[in-house]
């Protein structure tokens, strides 16, 4: 498999974690979003959405969008399972995934922040205020969901699920942007536990071939 990824992309990080947890080998292709490599003609042919990640399967099929890739990996490589079989338990995991993937990330990704500054003229302070506002809105929902439905050492049980796969990259970015995370003790407890695991460490930005300062 081939993975097109940017080291600091939280959506790419999700996929890297899942690949690591499932013990899958892949070739890494760095796409520097800061340098605009996602807007090159060759890359747009690969992904008209001009984003990362993209997974190219062993059969040569190209899959874009992290949640679609995670679903493909779960269906194609069943063990270790990252989704429970029980319908309600599965829904609880996907609820948390979608708080992050649908509510937090879309308004805080790199192209949105660039538009706010470049086209709307926001200052660095205003951009950071925007970012922290939506982190707070989303993380309040995450923390409430974990307190109401979460259990065990991870988000939902004694082993990571897709909820942890989505949570850790989002918290990592929030910490990198100096967001105050003290109001989310349950999420931060899970975050600290996960980033100590070798599977999560292998997937971290610092350990990717395209790591930049």
Image (cartoon, helix red, strand yellow):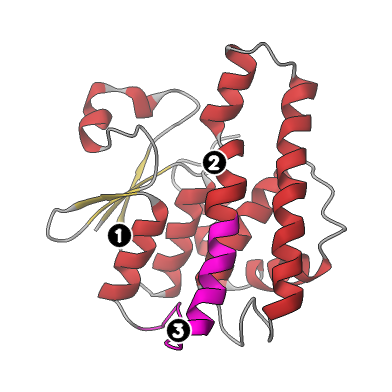
Return the mark for residue 106.
2
Indicate the position of residue 80 as horizontal and vertical percent values.
41, 83
User: What residue sits 51% from the left and 83% below the top?
Assistant: 88
At horizontal 64% and vertical 17% (from top left) the residue drawn is 117
Question: Percent x, y for residue 206?
Answer: 57, 50
Residue 192's place in the image compared with 46, above or below, is below
Query: Residue 26 got which mark?
Result: 1
- Please tell me the numbered disc located at residue 87: 3
Where 70 sits versus 42, above or below?
below
SS category of the residue bearing label 1: loop
Residue 200 in view here: no
Q: Residue furthest right?
A: 182
Horizontal arrangement in the rendering, residue 39 relative to residue 58 (left or right): right
Image coordinates for residue 64, horizontal then vertical, percent: 31, 48
Q: Residue placed at 59% from the left, 49% from the top?
A: 103
Which is more toward the observer, 184 or 202?
Answer: 184
Kind of element beneath mark 3? helix
Q: Which numbered disc, 1 or 3, marks the residue that appears first in the sequence?
A: 1
Q: Which residues are magenta?
A: 79-99
């Amino acid at each position: 498999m081939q993975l097109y990824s940017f080291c600091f992309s939280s959506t790419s990080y999700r996929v890297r974690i899942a690949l690591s947890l499932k013990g899958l080998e892949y070739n890494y292709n760095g796409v520097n979003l800061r340098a605009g490599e996602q807007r090159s003609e060759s890359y747009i042919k690969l992904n008209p959405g001009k984003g990362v990640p993209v997974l190219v399967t062993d059969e040569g099929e190209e899959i874009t969008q992290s949640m679609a890739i995670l679903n493909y990996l779960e269906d194609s490589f069943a063990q270790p399972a990252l989704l429970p079989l029980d319908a309600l338990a599965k829904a609880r995991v996907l609820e948390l995934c979608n708080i992050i993937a649908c509510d937090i990330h879309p308004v805080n990704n790199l192209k949105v922040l660039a538009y706010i500054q470049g086209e709307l003229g926001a200052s660095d302070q205003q951009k950071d205020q925007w970012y922290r506002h939506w982190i707070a809105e989303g993380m309040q929902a995450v923390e409430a969901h974990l307190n109401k439905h979460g259990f065990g050492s991870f988000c939902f049980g004694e082993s990571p699920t897709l909820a942890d796969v989505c949570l850790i990259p989002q918290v990592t970015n929030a910490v990198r942007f100096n967001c105050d995370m003290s109001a989310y003790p349950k999420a931060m407890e899970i975050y600290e536990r996960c980033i100590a695991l070798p599977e999560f460490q292998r997937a971290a930005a610092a350990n990717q071939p395209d790591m930049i300062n």
